Amino acid sequence: MPTIRFMWVDQRGGVQGYEGEVAQGVLNDGRMTPRSPDFPGPAGEFVQLSDDHSFAIEPDDPAPVFLHEGLRASMETWMYPIQSPEEEVRAVTKVRDAVIQLAESRWAQGGVLKTFDTVTRTERVGAGVAVVGRCVVIEPA
């Protein structure tokens, strides 16, 4: 049975989570309403985030993430093309800083409840290679 994560916001405005196992068929639907009396989260429907969101939230263990229907997740992304492996370290720093600035500007606009750490990785983009940074931002729906 696959492991999944649920995420919601508590009364203090902090993002909370719960990890559990579900039948494979649940993942095919993309929506879930936990009914167990042991579930610590709020009532309501939870919607599955994309695989990219799940990876950016927990890159070492990207289990599917289901976010409470009262929240919305978006992703701040920045890409920096590189020509050689020597450019990669400099590009990672530039990309990370750019994504942090994007996320901080979202905070300044108000309404953001949580931003996750920026995740960077080198990816094939078209015919080239780029360092891509991503940061998930959680806010009210």
Image (tube, helix red, strand yellow):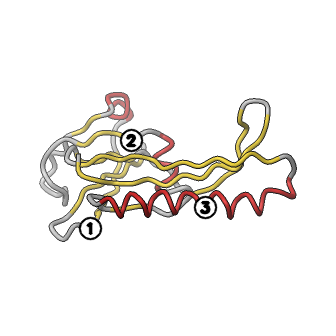
The residue where tag 2 is placed is 49
Q: Position of residue 117 (x, y in %)?
A: 50, 63
Characterize the local packing of mark 1: few (<14), some (14-19) or many (20 or more) Cα atoms within 10 angstroms. Answer: few
The residue where tag 1 is placed is 14
- Judged by depth in the image, the label closer to the viewer, 3 or 1, is 3
On residue 96, which mark appears? 3
Up-down relation of residue 22 to residue 119 (above or below): above
Dots 2, 1 in contact, CB < 8 A: no
Q: Is residue 38 left or right of residue 78?
A: left
Q: Which residue sits at x=44%, y=39%?
A: 50
Characterize the local packing of mark 3: few (<14), some (14-19) or many (20 or more) Cα atoms within 10 angstroms. Answer: many
Tell me which numbered mark, 3 or 2, is placed earlier along the sequence: 2
Q: Position of residue 2 (x, y in %)?
A: 42, 43
Characterize the local packing of mark 2: few (<14), some (14-19) or many (20 or more) Cα atoms within 10 angstroms. Answer: some
Dots 3, 1 in contact, CB < 8 A: no
Q: Secondary structure at mark 1?
A: loop
Residue flagged by tag 1: what amino acid is it?
Answer: Gly
Q: Which residue sits at x=42%, y=45%?
A: 64
Q: Secondary structure at mark 3?
A: helix
- Judged by depth in the image, the label closer to the viewer, 3 or 2, is 3
Tell me which numbered mark, 2 or 1, is placed earlier along the sequence: 1
Q: Could you say which is closer to the camera, residue 89 or residue 105?
A: 105
> The N terminus lies in which quarter of the figure?
top left
Q: Is residue 106 left or right of residue 96?
A: left
Rendered image quadrant of residue 95: bottom right
Give the CA distance from mark 3 to mark 1: 24 Å
Up-down relation of residue 16 to residue 75 (above or below): below
How many numbered circles are shown? 3
Q: Position of residue 9 (x, y in %)?
A: 23, 60
Residue flagged by tag 3: what amino acid is it?
Answer: Arg
